[in-house]
């Protein structure tokens, strides 16, 4: 039998370059997501769904966030197949391209006042395109970073693409902060809201250039050389690792859902119910995001030392403990306390978020890993996409009792904690099923 030739490890400089390309791509995806999240919290209802009334329009605006999450599993199946059959690099060029174009097109949509429901229909369609793109982005970005690195440093490099979320959050919040300062409210509502979406085009060009300039991962090239590509990866992952899929979905829930709760629902809740200035909430969110630029790599280092699943569990425990206190204190908070709460409420879920890629990478073999990571993450994201609407419904049902967001945050924390514990046991039990790749030699 002929053996495949050994593949040389990627040089450290190449690993860093690939990590940058991976993080820049996820930053664009996150920027596009958060632009719409901020947009939906403030503009979507009045501009596109005004005839429904204030409450129904706001709820519909949150549901436009949710539909992009609902369609994500479809994107995960499509791009997971491409990633496991055609390669990680090629697939990620498609995902980032679709996202950038769809986001820019939202910036030129007609509002209800200009074209009736036509603009709302187009908005929903573009959100579906964004969701399909997101379905294949995260898993590929994680693999792009980890499959160029050695096994020892894999957990650290799995954290680097996670920087895309705070970078995207910071950029989008900064854009809105500047716009609220520079433009009067009437001009912002009339045309200024379009600017953040159009900014996706130059960011897209940078992302495409960086991803075009890197090589395919050594791990995928080894899979091809050995003839181990699955004909239908989606079927293989459920046939071989069904339990791992359940664990991965639960482990991802807090990291994704906490962003939906903090950066979308809490902003609306803070302005409409607690009386905070919209700009103050954006500033507090941005400060929390800046801190994540430091904490995510540090949590990546920690994950490389003690294991990704343990770091995910520690983050879930911490978040569970502060779920109710943080919203109780928020009721009477001044701006300084608001910033402190956003930092504390962000840094603990960030532990689970930073180590998530490493945890999920360890759960699945390389021949259907793209499909598995993408689909599990997409399912968790689908659930998380309903967090703002679910929390709003709970708020309406309880008269916006101070504890209602804490219930949602605590529930997500508990699910992720149990899943992380299960991941430790599952990975240890299946360690023998994942032989060391020659790339790591």
Image (cartoon, rainbow, N blue to C red):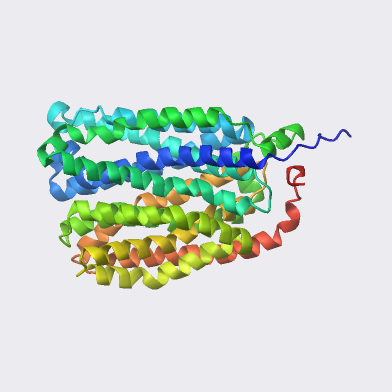
272 vs 90, left or right, is left
Judged left or right of residue 416, residue 35 is left
Q: Position of residue 257 (x, y in %)?
A: 39, 55
Q: Answer above or below: position of 95 versus 261.
A: above
Query: In this image, 300 relative to 122: left or right?
Result: right
Pick whichever, 189 or 210, lies toward us.
210
Task: Tell which of 224 and 207 is nearer to you.
Answer: 207
Residue at the outermost right position? 1
Residue occupying image coordinates x 52% and y 40%: 20
Give percent across and percent down for residue 174. 29, 45
The residue sitting at 58% across, 53% down in the picture is 156
Task: From the viewer's perspective, tell me whether residue 100 is left or right of residue 334.
Answer: right
- Vertical placement of residue 83 versus 145, above or below: above
| x then y, percent, for residue 248 | 54, 55
- Residue 37 appears in the figure: no
For the point 42% across and 55% down, which residue is it?
292
Is 54 in front, or is 397?
54
Quick check: 274 above or below 217?
A: below
Identify the residue shown where x is 25% and y is 43%. 176
Location of residue 177 in the rendering, given as x and y in whole percent from the top left corner: 23, 45
| Snapshot quadrant of residue 424 | bottom right
- Examine the rendered structure and indicate whether residue 80 appears above or below residue 159: above
Q: Quadrant of residue 1?
A: top right
Q: Is residue 29 visible?
A: yes
Residue 328 found in image quarter: bottom left
């Amino acid at each position: 039998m002929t053996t495949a030739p050994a593949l040389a490890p990627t040089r450290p400089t190449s690993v860093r370059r690939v990590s940058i390309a991976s993080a820049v791509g996820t930053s664009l995806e996150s920027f596009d997501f958060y632009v719409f999240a901020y947009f939906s919290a403030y503009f979507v209802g009045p501009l596109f769904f005004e005839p429904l009334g204030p409450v129904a329009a706001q709820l519909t605006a949150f549901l436009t966030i949710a539909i992009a999450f609902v369609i994500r599993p479809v994107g995960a199946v499509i791009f997971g197949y491409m990633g496991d059959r055609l390669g990680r690099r090629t697939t990620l060029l498609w995902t980032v391209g679709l996202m950038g174009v769809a986001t820019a097109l939202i910036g030129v949509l007609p509002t209800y006042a200009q074209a009736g429901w036509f603009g709302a229909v187009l908005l929903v369609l573009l959100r579906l395109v964004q969701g399909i793109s997101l379905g294949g982005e995260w898993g590929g970005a994680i693999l792009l970073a980890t499959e160029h690195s050695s096994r020892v440093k894999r957990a650290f490099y799995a954290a680097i693409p996670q920087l895309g979320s705070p970078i995207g959050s910071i950029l989008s919040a900064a854009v809105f902060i500047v716009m609220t300062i520079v433009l009067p409210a009437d001009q912002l509502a009339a045309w200024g809201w379009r600017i953040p979406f159009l900014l996706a085009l130059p960011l897209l060009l940078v992302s495409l250039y960086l991803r075009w300039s890197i090589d395919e991962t050594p791990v995928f090239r080894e899979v091809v050389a050995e003839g181990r590509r699955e004909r239908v990866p989606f079927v293989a992952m459920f046939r071989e690792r069904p339990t791992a899929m359940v664990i991965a979905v639960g482990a991802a829930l807090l990291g994704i859902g906490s962003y939906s709760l903090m950066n979308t629902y809490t902003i609306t809740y803070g302005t409409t119910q607690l009386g905070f200035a919209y700009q103050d909430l954006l500033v507090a969110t941005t400060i929390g995001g800046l801190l994540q630029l430091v904490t995510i790599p540090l949590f990546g280092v920690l994950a490389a030392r003690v294991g990704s699943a343990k770091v995910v569990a520690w983050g879930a425990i911490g978040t569970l403990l502060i779920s109710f206190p943080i919203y109780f204190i928020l009721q009477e908070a001044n701006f300084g306390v608001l910033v402190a709460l956003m930092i504390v409420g962000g840094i603990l879920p960030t532990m689970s978020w930073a180590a998530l890629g490493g945890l999920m990478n360890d759960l699945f073999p390389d021949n259907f890993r793209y499909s598995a990571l993408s689909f599990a993450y997409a399912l968790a994201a689908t659930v998380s996409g309903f967090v703002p609407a679910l929390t709003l419904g709970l708020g309406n049902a309880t008269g916006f009792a101070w504890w209602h967001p804490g219930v949602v945050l605590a529930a997500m924390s508990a699910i992720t904690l149990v899943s992380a514990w299960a991941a430790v046991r599952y990975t240890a039990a299946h360690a023998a099923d994942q032989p060391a790749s020659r790339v790591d030699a």
